[in-house]
Image: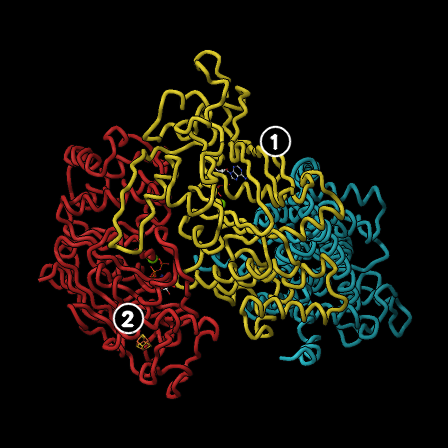
Chain colours: A cyan, B red, C yellow
């Protein structure tokens, strides 16, 4: 090949060297090999569409009170054509609430998971790469985070910082990075002695470059594994916090719906249409996270599967 | 009659990617009291062959053809007790990397005794007494029987696993890479012990290695294995002095000697074929500078050449002429790279 | 004229992870991986480091490459103290000194294509103006290590190449920065014999064409004879003999070298050999003997050997030996040795 031919082929070669494209390809490979992971991806896909389309698709504003033609508040309606899943005791449309709940779930789940992955991976990279006092300090911090009982602490912090969905996310990131951090650190410790990492040093790569260009791509799949598990955890935690009444009162989330239903004795009235849909949605969303996590795990540690 | 006669033995592994033909019709015989070296590159099927002989193949492996006669008996037809009368008692093996699989929590003496009780049905006192004699035999003080594996050096551990193979007085010992992980000095000592044992006990020895020098050092006969086949066999002196197969010729120029100033070394370009889909013709043809058209589709059989030797090459009759050209011929391939498999079409530079 | 590389009394201790008991007792045990290594290497020279497993060859190499920091001693490169380099000086040192790893299967990032791996040194050292120019250089480097045509390797991942091809890629990567000194740690020990020669020849050609200075580490003396003009034999972290390769191998002077040379098997079964027997006791690098490190195993051990460490001093024919059999090696203070020996 002449140099001009090579110049023509250049874009193709450089494109193929992107790490992030790699990571996406890995995710796709996971989904293709594992039906559960595929199901998880599909669930998230549907959730994403619903969350984006909620304002357009939802028949009512989830916060609005609805009225019957006779002017009465349409409270505690059973499912009907105008209200597919009935209404709450204040006359809000449950179906619209379920649709809008997807927004809260996705925001909480993905923002928290993103935060957990970023923070945990950074901590793991630095602790594993610079052994010594950096490692010592970061791992003692992780020990502290491990020592804190997660849910009570989350509630206390949210109560202290104020009931807002962003505070919920923040609290989860602050408490959940520890697992990711530990695991990434262990991985980095073993990668650090690999020849190709030493080779990067020999070539003159700086510490940061070695860490982020040479080590990070090799731990990203593991970060994603913990990230996808964190999505599930975060959605579940947000639901719990809301259900216990510490959630953001201005955001309709599935946990908030459950709390609403519970407080209005929906269970006693057998109003399944009220509490089952949000419960089901929480379950699906959480499961989707674990399914994807499982797929990653099997790709990363194939031995588990064979045994 | 030879002690061991292997006739067109074939072994396959079943894998996710189809069958791997690890041993593809090996024919080899071992005379009583002789040391035979089996040499070949990594993955050519040496370990598989050894495990097939002693009947300890992994579960995904199957013997798909051939015969193995030991002292007249057809080993592959035996099973159960009849087979156990041969395995370990008459044929024993020192497995590859065996010294790393000594159990770290038991004393080596206890492991040796346990082996004898399990494989030979000896009573404990009998086994203990024998263990001491074995230790003396392999050149370790009996006191070391009480040590744990980590208290022994690599060479001593290797001696212990050799003692385990000798435990039941076998006639044939198969040693799979017995010195590979050892330093030269220790390697030399272990090899010398092996040779002395072989001579004093009148053992037959099948020594598996990828290191030709080890074979040259220790063995009487040599069999060269390539891609699941024996491609050349004969006495060590003759084979190394005047190889009949191009692969052996290539190997001779491929690594330096300590004791002579080496001329420029010549590698054998390319690498062995994938045994999941072995080629139709000679497996060495793509790396062979002497391949002719016939080599690409017709697989050469292992046939007698001159002087009681065996070679699997269509041009074995021209060996003397080829040998003189071998260094230049292999060097030519070094610059052009290995030839791709083109059945039918004569490869460039194939004829002389 | 000063030497390209001057290694003086280099030492490296690793702390030995010890059990609870010794932690309580407060004893700090260390592995003396490198214990006083000194040598010089001139531009264009090739030095072979031989010795058995664990004698400190890799540690010495990593100290030279500044992948490890020495416990004591100094390394000077082109007259400058390597330990003191920082910033752009260090970067330039990293450009001038390159390393070939023992295990080619691990030396390349498994998630990088070959092209990406080979672009890395160019990016780090800002060689080449444009990406196109860099790709050209990569193609040239692959061509020089006989991987042809280069483009076919660009988008391959390491696991798609054979060991011999990988080692060539690793060599190509080292060449991209135009090094002055190339350190190779057992570059062919993981490769099959039939293809070793290809890699060895390549390295020989390169060092001749480019006047590369090379340090070649191997436990295989035959390979060192083929590759190097000077050979150093290491034992327990020290050099026990160093000199022109032919001298060291044809007429070994140190008893350890004699044993080592005689133990190497020969591919020619007809060549007669006269093995030198030594004990196969395991040398332990954490409790070094006061005297000669080889005393325990030496067939010619004398009283002085057990007390006094011999110095590496010239004997003849350009060979230096650290052994009391050669009177120059015995330190002058040793007159009437006994009570007043320096403890080691
Ligand atoms: N359990 C197994 N399942 C599938 N394939 C196997 C198995 N064991 C070995 N093989 C394949 O069979 C072939 C021969 O392997 P074998 O271990 O006999 O080679 P070898 O000559 O002993 O190599 P080495 O010198 O590396 O020990 C190789 O291609 C190997 O990949
Ligand atoms: N990171 C480490 N921590 C503790 N001890 C080490 C470390 N690296 C090496 N050692 C010890 O230092 C000594 C020298 O090791 P080194 O790797 O330099 O030997 P070598 O000559 O390269 O051996 P080989 O031929 O086996 O590669 C050995 O005893 C080894 O166990
Ligand atoms: S000449 Fe033909 S048969 Fe003989 S080794 Fe070469 S390719 Fe095989
Ligand atoms: Mg094997
Ligand atoms: Mg080493």
- Where residue C5 sits, quadrant-wise, is top right
In the rendered image, residue B275, in percent from the top left (x then y), is placed at 37, 71
Q: Secondary structure at mark 1?
A: strand
For the point 50% across and 42% down, the residue is C57
In the foreground, B118 or A230: B118
Q: Which mark is residue B245?
A: 2
Q: Residues at marks 1 and 2, common chain?
A: no
In the rendered image, residue B109, in percent from the top left (x then y), is placed at 26, 34
How many residues crowd around disc 2 within 10 Å: few (fewer than 14), some, or many (20 or more)?
A: many
Task: Determine whether, in the image, residue C221 is placed left or right of residue A130.
Answer: left
In the rendered image, residue A276, in percent from the top left (x then y), is placed at 68, 62
Query: Can the viewer see residue A293 in this picture?
Result: no
| Dots 1, 2 in contact, CB < 8 A | no
Task: Determine whether, in the image, residue C150 is placed left or right of residue B151.
Answer: right
The yes-or-no answer for disc 2 within 8 Å of ligand 3 is yes
For the point 61% across and 46% down, the residue is C65
Q: Chain of mark 1?
A: C
In the foreground, C244 or A127: C244
How many residues crowd around disc 1 within 10 Å: few (fewer than 14), some, or many (20 or more)?
A: some
Q: Does residue C309 sit above or below A81 in this rendering?
A: above
For the point 46% across and 16% down, the residue is C335
Specify the quadrant that holds the N terminus of chain C: top right
Q: Chain of mark 2?
A: B
Q: Which residue is at the far front?
A: C317
The yes-or-no answer for disc 1 within 8 Å of ligand 2 is no
- Where residue B309 sits, quadrant-wise, is bottom left
Q: Secondary structure at mark 2?
A: loop
List the residue tagged with mark 1.
C72
């Amino acid at each position: 090949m002449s140099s001009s031919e090579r110049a023509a082929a250049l874009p193709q070669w450089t494109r193929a060297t992107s790490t992030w494209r790699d990571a996406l390809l890995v995710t796709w490979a996971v989904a293709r090999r594992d039906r559960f992971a595929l199901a998880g991806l599909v669930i998230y896909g549907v959730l994403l569409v619903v969350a984006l389309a909620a304002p357009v698709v939802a028949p009512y504003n989830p916060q609005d009170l609805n009225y019957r033609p006779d002017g009465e508040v349409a409270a505690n309606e059973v499912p009907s054509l105008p209200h597919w899943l009935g209404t709450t005791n204040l006359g809000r449309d449950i179906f619209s609430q379920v649709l809008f709940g997807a927004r809260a779930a996705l925001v909480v789940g993905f923002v928290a998971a993103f935060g957990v992955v970023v923070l945990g991976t950074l901590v793991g990279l630095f602790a594993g790469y610079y052994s010594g006092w950096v490692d010592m300090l970061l791992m003692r911090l992780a020990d502290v985070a491990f020592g804190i009982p997660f849910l009570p602490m989350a509630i206390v912090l949210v109560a202290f910082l104020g009931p807002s969905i962003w505070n919920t996310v923040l609290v989860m990131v602050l408490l959940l990075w520890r697992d990711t951090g530990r695991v990434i650190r262990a991985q980095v410790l073993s990668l650090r002695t690999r020849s190709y990492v030493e080779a990067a040093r020999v070539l003159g790569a700086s510490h940061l470059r070695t860490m982020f260009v040479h080590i990070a791509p090799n731990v990203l799949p593991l970060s994603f594994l913990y990230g996808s598990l964190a999505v599930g955890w975060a959605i579940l935690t947000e639901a719990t916090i809301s259900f216990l009444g510490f959630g953001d009162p201005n955001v309709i989330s599935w946990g908030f719906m459950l709390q609403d239903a519970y407080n209005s004795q929906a269970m006693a009235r057998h109003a399944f249409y009220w509490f089952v849909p949000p419960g089901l949605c929480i379950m699906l969303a959480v499961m989707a996270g674990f399914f994807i996590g499982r797929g990653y795990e099997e790709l990363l540690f194939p031995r588990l599967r064979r045994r | 009659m030879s002690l061991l006669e292997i006739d067109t033995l074939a072994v396959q592994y079943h894998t996710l990617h189809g069958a791997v033909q690890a041993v593809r019709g090996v024919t080899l015989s071992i005379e009583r009291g002789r040391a035979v070296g089996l040499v070949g590159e990594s993955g050519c099927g040496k370990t598989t062959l050894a495990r097939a002989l002693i009947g300890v193949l992994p579960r995904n492996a199957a013997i798909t053809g051939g015969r193995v006669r030991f002292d007249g008996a057809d080993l592959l037809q035996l099973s159960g007790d009849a087979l156990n009368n041969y395995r370990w008692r008459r044929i024993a093996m020192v497995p590859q990397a065996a010294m790393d699989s000594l159990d770290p929590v038991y004393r080596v003496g206890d492991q040796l005794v346990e082996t004898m009780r399990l494989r030979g049905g000896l009573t404990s006192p009998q086994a203990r007494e024998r263990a001491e004699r074995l230790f003396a035999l392999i050149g370790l003080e009996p006191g070391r029987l009480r040590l744990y594996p980590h208290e022994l050096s690599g060479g001593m551990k290797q001696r212990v696993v050799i003692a385990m193979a000798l435990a039941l007085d076998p006639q044939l010992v198969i040693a799979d890479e017995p010195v590979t992980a050892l330093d030269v000095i220790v390697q030399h000592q272990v090899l010398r012990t092996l040779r002395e044992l072989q001579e004093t006990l009148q053992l037959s020895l099948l020594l598996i290695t990828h290191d030709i020098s080890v074979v040259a050092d220790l063995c009487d006969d040599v069999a060269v294995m390539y891609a699941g086949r024996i491609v050349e066999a004969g006495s060590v002196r003759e084979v190394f002095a005047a190889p009949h197969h191009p692969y052996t010729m290539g190997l001779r120029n491929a690594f330096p000697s300590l004791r002579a100033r080496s001329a420029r070394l010549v590698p054998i370009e390319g690498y062995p074929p994938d045994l999941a889909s072995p080629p139709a013709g000679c497996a060495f043809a793509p790396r062979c500078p002497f391949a002719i058209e016939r080599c690409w589709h017709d697989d050469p059989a292992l046939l007698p050449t001159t002087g009681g030797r065996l070679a699997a090459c269509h041009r074995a009759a021209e060996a003397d002429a080829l040998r003189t050209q071998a260094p230049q011929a292999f060097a030519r391939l070094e610059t052009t790279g290995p030839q791709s498999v083109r059945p039918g079409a004569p490869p460039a530079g194939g004829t002389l | 004229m000063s030497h390209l590389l001057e290694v003086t009394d280099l030492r490296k201790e690793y702390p030995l992870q010890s059990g609870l008991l010794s932690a309580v007792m407060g004893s700090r045990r260390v592995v003396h991986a490198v214990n006083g290594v000194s040598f010089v290497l001139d531009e264009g020279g090739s030095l072979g480091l031989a010795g058995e497993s664990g004698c400190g060859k890799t540690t010495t190499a990593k100290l030279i490459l500044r992948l490890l920091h020495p416990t004591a001693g100094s390394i000077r490169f082109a007259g400058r103290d390597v330990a003191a380099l920082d910033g752009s000086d260090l970067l330039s040192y990293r450009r001038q000194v390159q390393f070939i790893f023992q295990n080619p299967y691990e030396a390349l990032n498994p998630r990088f294509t070959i092209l990406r791996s080979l672009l890395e040194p160019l990016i780090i050292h800002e060689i080449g103006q444009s990406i196109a120019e860099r790709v050209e250089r990569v193609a040239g480097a692959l061509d020089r290590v006989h991987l042809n045509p280069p483009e076919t390797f660009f988008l391959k991942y390491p696991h798609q190449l054979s060991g011999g091809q990988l080692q060539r890629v690793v060599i190509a990567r080292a060449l991209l920065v135009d090094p002055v000194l190339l350190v190779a740690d057992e570059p062919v020990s993981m490769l099959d014999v039939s293809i070793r020669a290809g890699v060895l020849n390549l390295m020989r050609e390169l060092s001749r064409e480019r006047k590369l200075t090379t340090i070649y580490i191997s436990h295989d003396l035959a390979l060192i004879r083929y590759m190097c003009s000077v050979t150093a034999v290491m034992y327990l972290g020290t050099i026990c003999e160093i000199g022109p390769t032919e001298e060291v191998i044809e007429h070994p002077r140190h008893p350890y070298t004699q044993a080592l040379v005689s133990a190497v098997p020969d591919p020619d079964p007809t060549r007669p050999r006269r093995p030198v027997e030594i004990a196969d006791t395991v040398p332990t690098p954490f409790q070094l003997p006061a005297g000669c490190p080889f005393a325990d195993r030496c067939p010619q051990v004398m009283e002085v050997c057990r007390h006094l460490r011999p110095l590496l001093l010239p004997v003849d024919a350009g060979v230096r030996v650290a052994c009391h059999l050669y009177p120059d090696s015995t330190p002058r203070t040793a007159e009437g040795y006994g009570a007043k020996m320096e403890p080691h």
